[in-house]
Amino acid sequence: MTAIYIILGVLAFLLLAFVLVCEIGFKLIFGGTNEVSGARYEKNFDKKLPPEFAKIMNEGREYGKTLPWEEVYIDSYDGYKLHGKLYAPKDAKICLVLCHGYKESGDHDFSGIIRTYAQKGYALLVIDQRAHVKSEGKYICFGIKERYDIRDWCRYLDERLGLKII
């Protein structure tokens, strides 16, 4: 009888260890970066890039800081406040919605091309995906919920600017 209790105790311990490892793994893979992104990008902006790309991206980033950005927010369909930066010159005919990659930021991902887009006269909306940088959210959903966020950003832009949205 004692052997059964020992075996059950060992099995319960293994099950608990498995659940904890799964939860930690889930949070590492799907957890957002909104709590640490800003500091991470300021400190390590060009550390992971080849020098020739780092130079281009740093120049673009500095140029981007000179544009008259407006901080904009929308509410997602499931109650999170989502953040974006809007550059909308008066003569723009097209607005580009720029969506960054996995655990990144728009300031990082688009710093190499921002000057080109701005000089072509495009309005630009650089969004922080849910659970990234200044947008609320706990988990990255790999498009399952983000597609609705993009739809809502496009609706916001249509109401606000009335431009062709790309």
Image: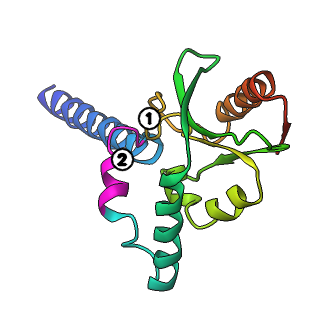
Numbered badge on residue 23: none
Task: State if disc 1 and disc 2 touch (CB < 8 Å).
Answer: yes
Using residue 30 as the reference point, say whether residue 129 is left or right of it.
right
Q: What is the magenta range?
A: 33-43
Q: Is residue 86 magenta?
A: no
Q: Earlier in the sequence, mark 2 or mark 1?
A: 2
Against 39, is 27 above or below?
above
Q: Is residue 42 magenta?
A: yes
Question: Where is residue 85 shown, x and y percent of the image?
Answer: 56, 39
Label 2 sits on a secondary structure element that is helix
Numbered badge on residue 38: 2
Is most of the magenta stretch helix, strand or loop? helix
Against 151, is 30 above or below?
below
The number of numbered discs placed on residues in the rendered structure image is 2
Residue in view at x 48 percent, y 53 percent? 65
Question: On the rendered image, what quadrant is the C terminus found in?
Answer: top right
Residue in view at x 36 percent, y 37 percent? 23
Towards the viewer: 93 or 113: 93
Residue tagged 1:
134
